[in-house]
Amino acid sequence: MAIRKIARMGHPVLRRPTTAVLNVSDPEIQRLIADMKETLADAQGVGLAAPQVYATSAVLMFFVPPSRAAGGDANEDGVPLTVLINPEIEPIGDEQVGGWEGCLSIPGLQGYVPRWHRIRYRALDETGASIERDAEGFHARVVQHEYDHLQGVLYPERMTDMTRFGFAEELMRHPMGEPTNAE
């Protein structure tokens, strides 16, 4: 396992859609997953997608801390670290909600991003088993954020009001709603 460098906004790897993983048990994919886990822990984020560590495979991971689980479908313990390979998402209903997001690839900045409130996602886990879950609240937000990375999309592209984009430190001093450490 190794901590990998995180790509920052502006690097072309973050603009390209990923390719499907054909063999979950491939040693390179398993090494990528192990490295991503270590990198995510080191960066103290809640989600990470393969392009953020300069890989082009459709792999993402996330967790929902207990402090972020309230008001969503997650139980009081949150959602444990979950690996999604070749994920697909679909909205459930028409409701979108705004929320503050940050990104390990856009350090120090945050923006207010509209996302589907409820989604269903399907994927393979790191063992190749199928996963299908409904998610709402922060759980849905973090999955959508990481999924966007697999499509070559960064959260500022989802924003509808660029006046709600700024440095986290300034937003904490001059709140426009409550900024959070969202990724």
Image (cartoon, rainbow, N blue to C red):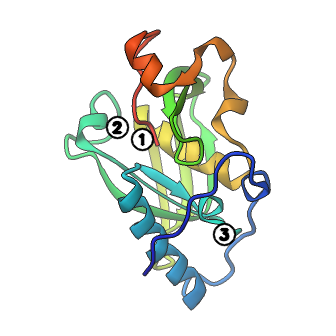
Measure the alpha-carbon separation of dots 3 and 1. Answer: 24 Å
Identified at 44% across, 65% down, the residue is 39
Instruction: Tell me whether the residue at label 3 lies in contact with that at label 1, contact meaning CB atoms closer than 8 angstroms.
Output: no
Picture quadrant where residue 120 is located: top right
Measure the alpha-carbon separation of dots 2 and 3. Answer: 31 Å
| Mark 3 or 1: the one toward you | 3
Q: Is residue 49 or residue 43 the one in the foreground?
A: 43
- Identify residue type, mark 2: Asp
Q: Is residue 22 or residue 101 the one in the foreground?
A: 101
Q: Which residue is mark 2?
A: 73
- Identify residue type, mark 3: Ala
- Against 9, is 165 above or below? above
Residue 34 seen in the figure? yes
Left or right, 127 with respect to 60, comes to: left
Which one is earlier in the sequence, the residue at label 2 or at label 3? 3
* Dot 1 alpha-carbon crowd within 10 angstroms: few under 14, some 14 to 19, many 20 or more: many
> Can you give x and y, in whole percent of width and height, for residue 81 in the image?
36, 59
Q: Is residue 137 or residue 100 the one in the foreground?
A: 100
Q: Which residue is mark 1?
A: 139
Q: Indicate the secondary structure of the residue bearing disc 1.
A: helix
> Can you give x and y, in whole percent of width and height, for residue 1 in the image?
43, 81
| Mark 2 or 1: the one toward you | 1
Identified at 72% across, 44% down, the residue is 153
- Against 122, is 115 above or below? above
> Can you give x and y, in whole percent of width and height, for residue 111 in the image?
56, 25
Q: Which residue is mark 3?
A: 55
Identified at 43% across, 24% down, the residue is 169
Picture quadrant where residue 26 is located: bottom right
Q: Indicate the secondary structure of the residue bearing disc 3.
A: loop
- Against 134, is 5 above or below? below
Residue 161 seen in the figure? no
- Against 144, is 36 above or below? below
